[in-house]
Image: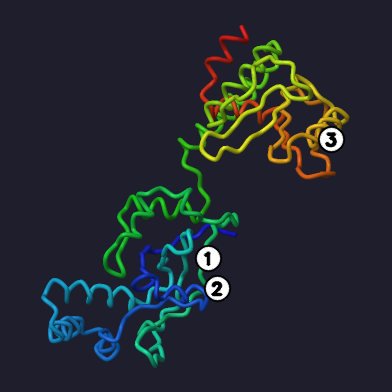
Amino acid sequence: MDQISPSKIRFIKLGAGGGWEGALDRGRLEWGTEDDRHVAGLTGDWAAVSQAYIAQGRIQSTATGYTNEARAFFDGDPDAMWITFARGRMWWCLADPEVHVAADGNGTDAAYYRATHGGWSDRDIDDRVLDLERLSTRLSQLQGYQRTICSLREEQEALCRRYVNAVPDPVQAAVAAARLELRLHLQTLIQQLTWHDFEQLIDLALARTGWVRMSSLGGTMKDVDLVVEQSFTRERMAVQIKSSANQQVVDDYARRLDERNAGERIMLICHSPAGTLVVPPSTGRRRLELVQGGEVADLAINAGLVDWTITRAL
């Protein structure tokens, strides 16, 4: 998909408490309550629209705010982008200029609507979902806007354009590239660790992610190097640590570990796999979890053990 270059970007709230959220499914841009029904007959005479709000008992500042929202909605610019937040995602659309009066028999639906071009979208131009978790709060804070329609600040508009057009932030891209390089080099260092140091690295990484060792480090348990317990959920996991492994080793450990306590998760961790290792189909109660190669480096990075690994690998 080509990049999208809207003339402007506006935020619209989908009614009080998300009452107009159905607009996403209907493919419509919707706005207005029963108190806004007079706007259609006064379109263009915004002073009269404001006076009508005052006649309803609104103070001047409130009437001005409502009038500005009406002007924004009735603005016929088909290149303006509209965004909203719902269902844990950001949605965007472009809308036809024509404003239609919505039929409403119960006073709960929006008073007006504009048809969208191809419906609302919750994805960027690379088809990635615009989850709120990956958006800056500088943009997602618009969810707390108290009225219904507002323009975006320059910074917010720039973020929105970047998200929709799947344009990475240059600093983020540089950090991601540096992390990838770190991952590759750290994987090599981990492969240089002695087996004892590698076992200690895994023990430390699991501990820093909430897994407490219940067994003795370097013990002589059959088929298992570590038994750990999640400190919050009390879930247990049996862990086998291997410096290297081929598919035959993985298959064998999957079978043997599956014979252990049915309440445990089972995991095999290997920093130097021979070829591409895959988890075999489960033949019993559980499926083996396999952590290998670069995933081990990720585990060390996320646990803050980069410096520890550098020191031990020297």
Amino acid of disc 3? Arg
The tag earlier along the polypeptide, 2 or 3, is 2
Residue receiving disc 2: 118
Amino acid of disc 1? Ser
| Residue at the (70%, 32%) spot, across then down | 291
Quadrant in the rendering for residue 301: top right
| Residue at the (57%, 37%) spot, across then down | 234
Give the class, few, some or many, for how many residues have Cα within 10 Å of label 3's Cα (few <14, many ≥20).
Answer: some
**Where in the figure is residue 181, as x and y percent of width and height?**
60, 26
Considering only vertical position in the picture, is 90 above or below 98?
above
**Where in the figure is residue 15, as x and y percent of width and height?**
36, 73
Considering only vertical position in the picture, is 141 above or below 258?
below
Q: Secondary structure at mark 2?
A: loop
The tag earlier along the polypeptide, 3 or 1, is 1
| Residue at the (33%, 76%) spot, across then down | 73
Q: Secondary structure at mark 1?
A: loop
Name the front one of labels 1 and 2: 1
Separation of marks 3 and 1 at Cα, in angstroms: 46 Å
